[in-house]
Amino acid sequence: MNNSISNKTIKGLVLVTILLVVNEVVFSQKDYHRGYIITNDSDTLYGLVKDRKPQPFGEIYKKIRFRDKGLFAKKLAPDQIKGYNNGTDRFESLWLDARGNFFREDYFSIPGSGERQFLKIISKGYLSYYHMEYVDPESFYIDFIPFFKREDETNLVRVTQGILGLKKKILAEYFIDCPELVEKILNKEINEPYEVALIYNSWKKNY
């Protein structure tokens, strides 16, 4: 009798354990999207990608979750891959080094300086337009800082200043090599960063 009870108890515990493990695995697969990663050897691996906890009370993972085979995911930091796609957006791992203070902070991308971080690619070209995402400490919603970067330069230029729109004076200096673009920026003919990048890259191709 005792052996019978003991066996039933063991079987019950095993079943509960299995159910808990399965439930944990299934729950952990939430919010994954079909995408890919680009390894440091430039290989593209397709699978399921999860890089954040959805809003509200969002969270951006420092290490993305990637699953190509099996049930369990690998955690990958920016220094382990060149970039990834989370199903809708592309991200690139860049070296970032912030210099300055509270009033003025400049960003540079110099290999070996600072740390690598995932930036969302809004448009890619000679002039690339990135979003550096972060979680707002007050609202807990995901926000971003927009940057431009030329492929042959190390500095990143901040594009906008909050609700004030384009940083016209800084961008006029940055794009001094393209007078027609500077004129459009100063005359408020264009107000969106994506338009700025599109016009500049088009001009650069025909320059």
Image (cartoon, grey):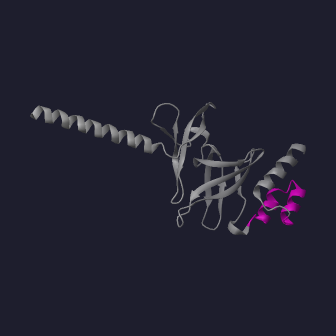
Dividing the picture into quarters, in which one does residue 34 lie?
top right
On-image quarter of the N terminus: top left
124 lies above or below 134:
above
Q: Residue at x 83, y 62 (%)?
A: 185
On-image quarter of the C terminus: top right
For the image shown, how many numbered marks are present on the structure?
0
Relative horizontal placement of residue 57, taking residue 201 as reference (left or right): left
Q: Residue at x 45, y 35 (%)?
A: 71
Q: Say whether residue 177 is magenta.
A: yes
Residue 194 x, y percent position in the rendering:
76, 54
**Could you say which is closer to the camera, residue 175 or residue 13?**
13
73 lies above or below 150:
above
Residue 20 x, y percent position in the rendering:
34, 42
Residue 91 x, y percent position in the rendering:
63, 45
132 lies above or below 136:
above
Relative horizontal placement of residue 182, taking residue 119 as reference (left or right): right
State the predominant SS element of the stretch in magenta. helix
Q: Residue at x 79, y 65 (%)?
A: 168
Q: Say whether residue 111 is magenta.
A: no
Relative horizontal placement of residue 180, taking residue 93 as reference (left or right): right
The magenta region covers 165-188
Residue 30 x, y percent position in the rendering:
49, 45
120 lies above or below 39:
below
